[in-house]
Amino acid sequence: MFELIVETDFAAAHSLRGYQGKCENLHGHNWKVQVVLKSQRLNDLGMVMDFKEVEDRVGEILESFDHKYLNDLAPFKRRNPTTENVSKVLYNELSKRLPRGVSITKVTTWESDCCGASYFG
């Protein structure tokens, strides 16, 4: 089994509905995202996928998040835009964009240097 790891980032604001504390208020983060892909086989070039291709596909998704208020986006109209849910949405969206034989091990989203959450699917 092979794994491929890509990290990127985006900036966005959110507020946590129903939270009792400061995070209930509008606030922003410089989010860091780590995507881990896996495959049992390598392509003809000897790769799981080209890093640039993965970065582009993740970037397509994050473009709709970057410099936005997450609560206003469709995936977060009914679910809180927590770090856990951001990871899950990214996982689900990226899963639709991967070639056959490549899958996601996990997506980890960090809202700060010391706080993050992963989704494993």
Image: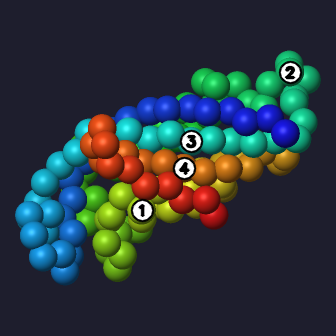
Which residue type does callout 1 highlight? Glu
Q: Residues within 10 Å of mark 4 (few under 14, many from 20)?
A: many
Query: Going by the picture, which residue comes out furthest to the top?
Result: 45
Residue on which the image places disc 2:
46
Pointers 4 and 1 in contact (C-beta within 8 Å): no
Q: Residues within 10 Å of mark 2 (few under 14, many from 20)?
A: few
The answer to whether residue 74 is above or below residue 5 is below
Q: Residues within 10 Å of mark 1 (few under 14, many from 20)?
A: some
Residue on which the image places disc 1:
84
Of pointers 4 and 2, the one earlier in the residue sequence: 2
Distance between the alpha carbons at the discs numbered 4 and 2: 23 Å
Distance between the alpha carbons at the discs numbered 3 and 4: 5 Å
Pointers 1 and 3 in contact (C-beta within 8 Å): no
Distance between the alpha carbons at the discs numbered 2 and 1: 33 Å
Between 95 and 36, the one lying in front of the other is 36
| Label disc, if present, on residue 35 of the rendered structure | 3
Distance between the alpha carbons at the discs numbered 4 and 1: 10 Å
Is residue 99 visible in the rendered structure shown here?
Answer: no
SS for dot 2: loop
Pointers 4 and 2 in contact (C-beta within 8 Å): no
Residue at left 61%, top 59%?
Answer: 120
Residue 55 in the image, given as x and y percentages of width and height: 55, 31
